[in-house]
Amino acid sequence: MACPAAALLLLPLLLGLLAPAPARATDPYAAFDWDVSYVTRSPLGVPQKVIAINKEFPGPVVNVTTNYNVAVNVLNSLDEPLLITWDGIQQRKNCWQDGVLGTNCPIPPGWNWTYNFQVKDQIGSFFYFPPLSMQRAAGGFGGITVNNRAVISVPFDTPDGDVRLFIGDWYNKNHTDLRKMLDDGKELGMPDGVLMNGKGPYRYNDSLVPAGIEYETIDVEPGKTYRFRVHNVGVSTSLNLRIQGHNMAMVETEGSYTMKQNFTNLDIHVGQSYSFLVTMDQNASSDYYIVASARFVNESLWTRVTGVAILHYSNSKGKASGPLPDPPNDEYDKSFSMNQARSIRMNVTTGAARPNPQGSFHYGEINVTQVYKLRNMPPVTINGKRRTTLNGISYSPPATPLRLADLYDKKEVYTLDFPTMPSDGPPAIGSSVINSTYKNFMEIVFQNNDTKVQTYHIDGYAFWVVGMDYGEWKNESRSTYNKWDGVSRCTTQCSPEHGPPSCCRSTARGSGTCARRIWTPGTSARRRTSGWWILTEATT
């Protein structure tokens, strides 16, 4: 019953027997065939192995509509096991397909596996990626668009075009070398750059950017409005996005329509996705820079960790030149990033995937039955390897996936003793799982006691972000929660930086069907204090 050999022989038949009855015959199907393989690319001028899908890097976009049944047949042509996970897609009624070690065996090299799921109760912009063994540092990611059904209106005019923008830090080392560095107890260190749609930076500075690097150009027409779907697909770096001379009107994040507000720049943390409406209202005297630069770092050392693409009007009169638009000045306003995050609010007056207002869930009236405070600390060395912990436990996935262990009533595969509050005992490795009850509501507090910004992703869930602040979370912190229009999303950040007492808090409610994992890639920060986030979620 352990992965990968024996269990995989039985798994296709097993899942066919256990899968719920198919959706109504009237629900459309979308089928995809993917061959995941290595290709050679030089995004920063250095040839290296990149993970591509059907030879594309980034991979193809999965463009579907709410209620679609999706079948993705994945052939693993890599030389190591592979899984594909589907970001915040809530696979109701079929949690066997989420592509994480908790529920699935990895696909061995040379094997194929078909993911079958139905997109339900969500709309918007997501992305897929390989979650195992640092593979995302080599690529393998692509976009997911879930459209409203025709009977559900969208709370803004139909844009003239749709632009997908993947931003993320990039290392010239292969992901296998990065993995070995972590296993040897070393830090990854500063990335070699930032890619935009898999390409290196435009040569805005001859000393920082070598000649001959391919860069991304986005062609637009003057006077038209485009929807930019932006994803931070990196592994460790928070990025600030800005488009020279243009406002970015946020309208959606990870499945929720937000109150429309204009940003000249926005911090986008690892794993997060946003939609912006950008109107081409400039005079096109030249092309314009699109910039994604590292946040919370020593900018004099990290200058080269900057992605630059080009926004090109059809009537542009010349190439972009001159300095890049300035990033935020944290020395002037240390609360800038936190206040940005707290300003994002759900649009509770509009329809979501279903024909009812998004705020009708009344998450502020939830009767919470369980509270977990999850504290992460700086990485430590356990059994010779660099490990991170939550409440003193570094999770180790068992050979038998948790769901198969439940199915066959296998004992001692995992334990249900995950502590509800942080422990001061020595850090340990374990397969310890949060013990919840079907249809219970949980409040999860993420307490960041590391020196770096952390992002937390709850796979397959949407949760309400209701509070955030600096310092230690306490019971009385609940008085500051936003109980009406907190945004619902699947990935949130937690800052360690020092700041005023009311700066970093978050809470949420989930709507998935089975236990999911939490991952916490970190980004660099200046100083060590702590911050907290609250997440209230339902296991419905």
Image (spheres, rainbow, N blue to C red):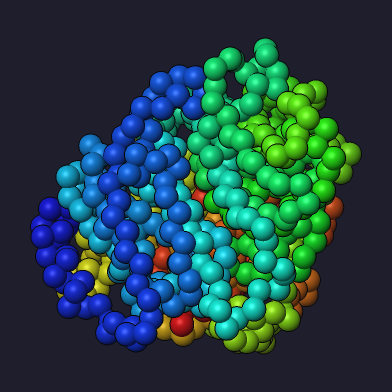
Viewer-side residue, 181 vs 293: 293
Question: In the image, what residue occupies the spot 26% across and 58% down?
Answer: 73
Instruction: Give the residue displayed 51% in from the left and 50% down from the top.
Output: 520
- Looking at the picture, does residue 442 appear above or below residue 289? below
> Residue 85 location, x and y as percent?
39, 57
Q: Quadrant of the N terminus?
A: bottom left
Of all residues, the one furthest to the right in this rendering is 332
Counting from the top left corner in percent of width and height, residue 30 is at: 36, 67
Number of marks: 0
- Taking the image as shown, residue 136 lies to the left or right of residue 528, namely left
Can you tell which quarter of the image residue 151 is in?
bottom right
Measured as percent of width and height from the top left, residue 294 is found at: 66, 35
Please state which of residues 30 and 506 is positioned toward the viewer in this rendering.
Answer: 30
Q: x, y (%) of residue 526?
A: 71, 35
Q: Residue 76 vs residue 146: left or right?
A: left
Can residue 220 be seen by looking at this rendering?
yes
- Closer to the camera in the image, 450 or 42: 42
Q: Residue at x 89, y 39 (%)?
A: 332
Give the image quarter of residue 433: bottom left
Residue 235 to residue 155: above or below: above
At x 77% / y 65%, what residue is drawn?
260
Name the residue furthest front: 315
Q: 457 above or below 16?
A: above
Q: Is residue 493 visible?
A: no
